[in-house]
Amino acid sequence: MAKIADIYYKLDPWKIIEEGFDSNRNMVSESIFSLGNEYMGVRGYFEEGCSCNSLLGSYFNGVYEFSKDVNKTAYKGIIDHTHFMVNSVDWLYTRIKLDEELLDLGTVEFKDFKRVLDLKEGTLTRQFIWNTKGGKTLKVRFLRFLNMDKTNEGFQRIEFEPINFTGNIKLIMALDFGIIHAAREKNYWNIVKKDFREDIAAIIGETLTSNQRVYSGFKLISDCIIEKSAYVKDKLIGYEVTVNLIKGEISKIDKLVSNLVVKDTFMDAEHIWSNGTSLVKKQEEKGFEAVLTDSTALWNNIWNRFDIQIDGDDKNQQGIRFCIFQMQQTYHGQDPNNNIGAKGLTGEAYNGHAFWDTETYCLPFFLFNNLKAAKNLLEFRYNNLNKAMERARMLDCSGACYPIATLNGEEACDLWQHASLQFQPSTGVAYGIWHYVQLSYDKEFLYTHGAEMLIQISRFLRSRGAWNQLTNKFGFYAVMGPDEFHMMVNNNCYTNYMAKKTFEYTIDVLKEMKTNSRQSYDMLQKKVNFTEEELQDLNNCAENMDILYNEETKIYEQHEGYFSLPHIEVDDIDIEDFPLYSNWSYDRIYRSDMIKQPDVLMLMFLYNQEFSSEVKEANYEYYETRCIHESSLSPSIHSVLAAELKKHEEALNFFGFATRMDLDNYNRNTREGLHTTSLAGAWVNIVYGFGGMRSDGEILKFYPSIPKIWNSYSFRVVYKEAILLIKVEKDKLNFKTLNGKSVEVSIYDEKYAIHPEGINIPFPGGSR
Amino acid sequence: MAKIADIYYKLDPWKIIEEGFDSNRNMVSESIFSLGNEYMGVRGYFEEGCSCNSLLGSYFNGVYEFSKDVNKTAYKGIIDHTHFMVNSVDWLYTRIKLDEELLDLGTVEFKDFKRVLDLKEGTLTRQFIWNTKGGKTLKVRFLRFLNMDKTNEGFQRIEFEPINFTGNIKLIMALDFGIIHAAREKNYWNIVKKDFREDIAAIIGETLTSNQRVYSGFKLISDCIIEKSAYVKDKLIGYEVTVNLIKGEISKIDKLVSNLVVKDTFMDAEHIWSNGTSLVKKQEEKGFEAVLTDSTALWNNIWNRFDIQIDGDDKNQQGIRFCIFQMQQTYHGQDPNNNIGAKGLTGEAYNGHAFWDTETYCLPFFLFNNLKAAKNLLEFRYNNLNKAMERARMLDCSGACYPIATLNGEEACDLWQHASLQFQPSTGVAYGIWHYVQLSYDKEFLYTHGAEMLIQISRFLRSRGAWNQLTNKFGFYAVMGPDEFHMMVNNNCYTNYMAKKTFEYTIDVLKEMKTNSRQSYDMLQKKVNFTEEELQDLNNCAENMDILYNEETKIYEQHEGYFSLPHIEVDDIDIEDFPLYSNWSYDRIYRSDMIKQPDVLMLMFLYNQEFSSEVKEANYEYYETRCIHESSLSPSIHSVLAAELKKHEEALNFFGFATRMDLDNYNRNTREGLHTTSLAGAWVNIVYGFGGMRSDGEILKFYPSIPKIWNSYSFRVVYKEAILLIKVEKDKLNFKTLNGKSVEVSIYDEKYAIHPEGINIPFPGGSR
């Protein structure tokens, strides 16, 4: 895999540290140092303004605008307008002037720059020493954090410590809706209201066409402000303050900001205002320090359930914690109307859209630590079932077709070759329901919400599929599987297999409901009006599903004709050619056996236990050599399978890409935002890969292994209410529960009851 | 084929007649009554203005604007901006007022409306009786025609005959660049200059971004104008005139217009002006009547070479003459910088672009009657060879890739699925060169221009193709053949076969040149630097070309996997669903065995003699039932093959669609312009179909047949300088030459020398 690390940040088990400022890397750092709490996210930009390249981004989950671009060539079923997560209020807006010198790290003289993201506490700090042209030396320190519990709340602290002078400094501290959505070079906000009341400066902005409103209000807390006056501009409100600095003493200003998203277009502005005001007041009541203490405790709790420790590999230790941290920041199941954008809340690339990554990569992360979050992700799909049904209509199909990219449930991908041909989102939702129920036993969800989605997804697949006129097998024609380097293919193995499983599970669930919960069965029957014939038809399709398999080589053919495609040696492709989408003619990407990401192998990850080791090995050997991993999600899946196939070196190499994708800017596009869903992939990688966990059977199974260079590692999963701690050392394993519960799991295909006191198990065949 | 005639115009062997005005059909009639002379074209709109639905269109061959739409998702090789034939000056602009009542056939009271397109003379006349609100009755008659020889010249005549009054009438007669390009609802002209000099009103317009200029100037000739004053508006210049009408007498005003296109951006406006002025003066010198007389004579000459007579089928008689007439109007080989737009000069659909239709459908029309025109069409491609080479570079390929749609040689199709996947234009040019040389023996063209195109086309195809990794056959992957209902397919039979023929012909031509014209061979070798190895490699590709053929069924597979695609009964598709592009989800069109137009059968038309009757029959039976003919070019090819296979009823049915496609508005979109290239298809249809002519062998062959309902038909072709007249009667054929020459042809596989005195040949097996 031709990817090269760009190592920049200091190694530390719990921190991301930048020492000295590289302005060329500023946008990458802004992504890396992002903060978020699911409700909102803010990039690690310099709040005082900076003339360096910067993407000043502040986003709220689910706050979007409609794109005004109309797709001229929108034939039927092709999306002609889209929506995108819109850059919102810069609630950290600050300007600092000392003797008329504006603080701008792009132009002023400074030293001892240090920026630290503390993963244990959830804080971002930055400090440096500013030497003004007038000869003054001032130590400046910024701190910011978001409340993970009361997610409206953001906190900013600025500290000044003059080294060689006493005197005044001037600041502007404000809220700015004049923010530019960088990807479209435009501001998307009208101001509904801005005012100062009860010592709170507040502003309500409204998006131009989606008419979503955001209230932002703040209070300044400081005992060193000697002058404060209103500072108001077109889309900005705040204060100009003068702070008296005394040589050798630290002066501190705290900004307490509450942001409130209002999607209800009927709520009047005054009502929003008063809700916002009371949020700021509560925030002030609790106070900066108390919230910071609580927030640290909350992060501590998170780490108690999620932490992964790696002894003997500092890079991956830092990397995996960064992944877990950023994933928590992006989503922790607070609201079923939120989902997980491909870039989280850290940038504008991919428009903030959620993809099929949610169910296939992110869901497992939550299934084993936060079932409520896992359920909420599925509730998001249920809440948008009607929109998926509308989408199926647009495609001349029945049932429900889930969007390839969305914020609000509507398909937002205007490339027909993806939006009309890829059904991973739909089969992924079905898989997600199955996986969730498998681990949660949440039959209520299954019977009231899950089953309805299943029947509608099955209906869509049934109407989109067709019968081969020679073999009379059922399959899908003109599709694109997970591998996005082959389009308009027939009988993509992944698509057909996933559809078969969807049909079977739908039938099973309905049978089970009929027996176990006749009332919900009848209600569902009444609501969606399915018939016995329909279920028999689904069964017939499942039984006759066209799965292309070569008995001799034991290789599944990715799609019809794949085996005979012209061959490309992927290792011979010039590194300058990557990313191929930018450097190769578009059609050239699609006509060889080169694949972008796992397709058949993805199936072998999702339904791991349905394939023999021999088959997995044959397919891995065949497809891995043809894969260029141009998706950030590719390495972790390969790593999981490599670990299973005892290709330990390879597994570790892939793992490194997954954990440090963004920290080392492997894809050279971290500046656009983090590869959030691949952060989840990194967790999947270690737990399913080295941990060898398998969750696609009746009992949770483990086949742990350990890379040669590691001394030990440990991870935690919650299973049947027990918090399992699995520690893997060179020569033995230790399994125990942390919360007093006991639970049965399978380890190397033997069942063990795991108790709080734990058990040691030797590695089969000794250490690797 | 689910297409229904909308019969409206009166039947007449030499005229298209509209009696009574149906305003709902106004835009269709505007297309039907279009005039053109290759240089310019003007729709049959009412020059006095009309409040009915109208597309007021006036176009010049090759005068285009650049589209400002940028394709946002333009990956490499995808066209991000296009060009289009732009609606230009309304040089017929007229307004007529009688007692303050404006003549507008959308609002005034009138009767006895009659509009006539005279195919023999090339004139359009229109007359009606206008009853004003004030009780006046006035007979109005319009006449217009374009000079087919001096193609800058346009003529307009207006005649008034007052029935019940004597008095004045007021007219504005002008030139208007304020014309709206209907497809984009925008005017694209700046005015460089407008003025009255030497009694000529003239104006120079310049396109906004392509900076092409058009001069338009006119003179009024009339002895009944009693007042004339300047009438000038923003983009318009002309006169307001008062004409004195005398009861019972005809008053006549002639407008003589010269238009001059200037693509040379360096020419200064004064120079253009003086060139334009001298054109108007020459036009006046010759005079209206003299030009009309010459023009009629010129049309007479055209008919002497092109006429097709059908005895016993008035509809097809009228239809075929309409086709020949409109084809001549669109193109007759005046200028190698012109080409043939899919809609000719009759509308804005398809942006005026020329497609692969030029070489495959239009070229034969000229090959047998006007070799200069045929050659000019190929010169157009030679003149644009550099642009085709640039296009190949954009596609990461070598050589030259001819555009799927163009006016100026650059690819103008921004749908990658066509522009990057269809190679019919390139193989079509190679076929065209071969076909032209086959009939013209123009070795000079072949050696100096043709061979260079051939080697560059072959290079493109070689670099775009690839080797199957299992069979080690050469072929094309991720392509779209002529059938546009299957995309990203592999080893499309047509594409592979045409490439094989292109390689073989290229090699043959270079061999021949090496022997026959070493100098041109060396020059070419020096210019394009080909090697023996390269030619051997092409030969290897040709020999190993993957042509999918089923020995048992004798059917060529359209592409890999076609035979097993889900089957659709095309006859079961609801007629309301057509056109499918508008009514079916885009992806739905691409995933069954339904085809849009001939693909394998197209091949069997182009290389007819390389396939046995048995094979042709098997493939016809198979593919015709799967074809919905959603291309206007489809019926004629099917008709030709049906005639060959003795399916005479079917052949005649298809022929009817071809000849009367627009007259009967079969596709319900004639309002957008004529299906110009399918007009050529109609000629091909009768000559290659019923006439059974075959031009793809060493000698010209004929296998005539005659539809049951026809008494006789005749057609003319020029072959080896002899004008052949072939008359086919119920029970015999008569072949003779019209210009004193003798020539050998094959008739039912026997060779005959054809002399001026002619020979009669009985039908084999009696009358059909």
Image (spheres, coloured by chain):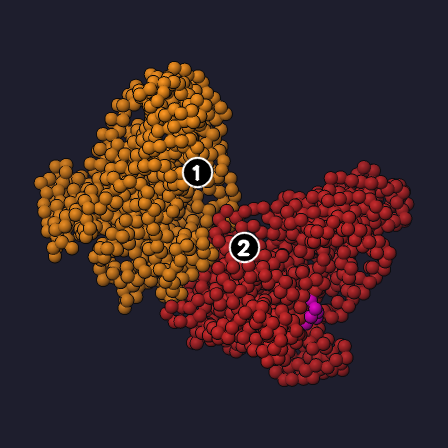
Chain colours: A orange, B red
Question: Which tag is nearer the camera, tag 1 or tag 2?
Answer: 1
Helix, strand or loop at disc 2? loop
How many numbered tags mark residues here? Answer: 2
Q: Against B88, is B532 above or below?
A: below
Q: Nearer the viewer, residue A22 or A543?
A: A22
Amino acid type assigned to the residue bearing label 2 in the image: Phe
At x 36%, y 62%, the residue is A569
Q: Nearer the viewer, residue B631 or B766?
A: B631
Q: Which residue is mark 2?
A: B578
Task: Look at the image and tell me whether residue B114 can be seen.
Answer: no
Magenta range: B368-373
At x 27%, y 25%, the residue is A291
Side (left or right) of A484 relative to A690 = right
Q: Residues within 10 Å of mark 1 (few under 14, many from 20)?
A: few
Q: Which residue is mark 1?
A: A53
Residue that extends furthest to the front in the rendered view of this protein: A135
Residue B52 in picture, x, y percent from top left: 69, 44
Q: Against A484, is A150 above or below?
A: above
At x 34%, y 46%, the residue is A6
